[in-house]
Image (cartoon, rainbow, N blue to C red):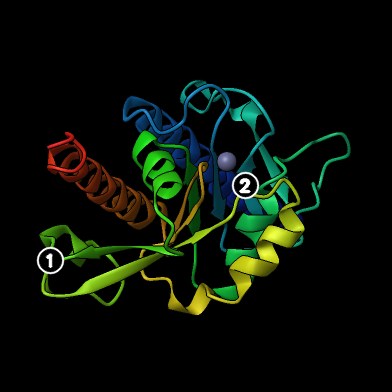
Amino acid sequence: MTEQLISVSSAQDGAWKTAVTQIIRAGERMDQRGWVPATAGNISVRLADGRIAVTRSGGHKGFLTPEGVIEIDLTGNPLLPGDRPSAETLLHCQIYAHFPHTGAVLHGHSIAATVLSMRTKERALYLADYEVLKVFEGQSTHATRVAVPIFSNDQDIARLARSVSLFLDEMKAGYIIQGHGVYVWGPDMDTALARLEGLEFLLACELERLKLSPSFQGM
Ligand SMILES: [Zn+2]
């Protein structure tokens, strides 16, 4: 009996260490790409037993240590007293609660997402005819158009979550908070990172095309 308990606890400990390693590596990758300036962004992983590992509030995501990752439940409450998750943790929990098979959520503040979402008056950015669209869930061809919803930024995260909740089922490539950044998720960290990289690549393409357009250059 005791041996069984020790074995379960050591398996859980191993799963936790794996999740923390994935989060640290994702933070380094996002930092290399310039998507987590200053203390921006947050990263989480859901373990098989339902626990969620998420980055602690504050701190640079490119220089994370195991102490920078804390354990929360599905409602966003820290499991250890004194731990403080990021305010935006509620947006991670909302995605995990809505999509039972989601295993990782990524949030970054890229230049392209920030600039493009502040420039448009539309409630979404539309990405069409790009080969990279195939990285998103359910997409098998470039000959398509994917809408990425844009929500107004709001320091009241509960209110922002309510706005997002109305559209969650329609999001194939995540969503954008205006003047702020993107939320992307996947069944595991590798898939979530690939989708984030795909979305950021496409947003960067849109920004470059805008800069090349005659109206941008005042012609
Ligand atoms: Zn943010």
73 vs 37, nearest the viewer: 37
Provide residue 9's location: percent of width, then percent of height. Answer: 68, 51
Q: In the picture provided, is 169 more to the left or to the right than 72?
A: left
21 vs 117, nearest the viewer: 117
Quadrant of the rendered image holding ligand 1:
top right
**214 shown above or below 91:** above
Residue that carries the numbered disc 1 in the rendered image: 129
Label 1, secondary structure: give it: loop
The CA span between labels 1 and 2 is 36 Å
Q: In percent of the image, x 51 and y 42: which residue is there?
A: 179
Label 2, secondary structure: give it: strand
Q: In percent of the image, x 53 and y 75: which residue is there?
A: 167
> Residue 129 appears in which quarter of the rendering?
bottom left
Numbered tag placed on residue 53 in the rendering? 2
Provide residue 116's location: percent of width, then percent of height. Answer: 36, 46
The amino acid type found where label 1 is placed reads Asp
Q: In percent of the image, x 50 and y 20: which residue is there?
A: 63
The amino acid type found where label 2 is placed reads Ala
Q: Pointer 1: residues within 10 angstroms few (<14), some, or many (20+)?
A: few
Q: Quadrant of the N terminus?
A: bottom right
Numbered tag placed on residue 83 in the rendering? none
Q: In the picture provided, is 118 more to the left or to the right than 58?
A: left
For marks 1 and 2 on the same chain, the one whose residue lies earlier in the sequence: 2
Residue farthest toward the right in the current orientation of the protein: 81
**Can residue 85 be seen at all in this image of the molecule?**
yes
Q: Pointer 2: residues within 10 angstroms few (<14), some, or many (20+)?
A: many
Q: In the picture provided, is 146 more to the left or to the right than 176?
A: left
Nearer mark to the viewer, of 1 and 2: 1
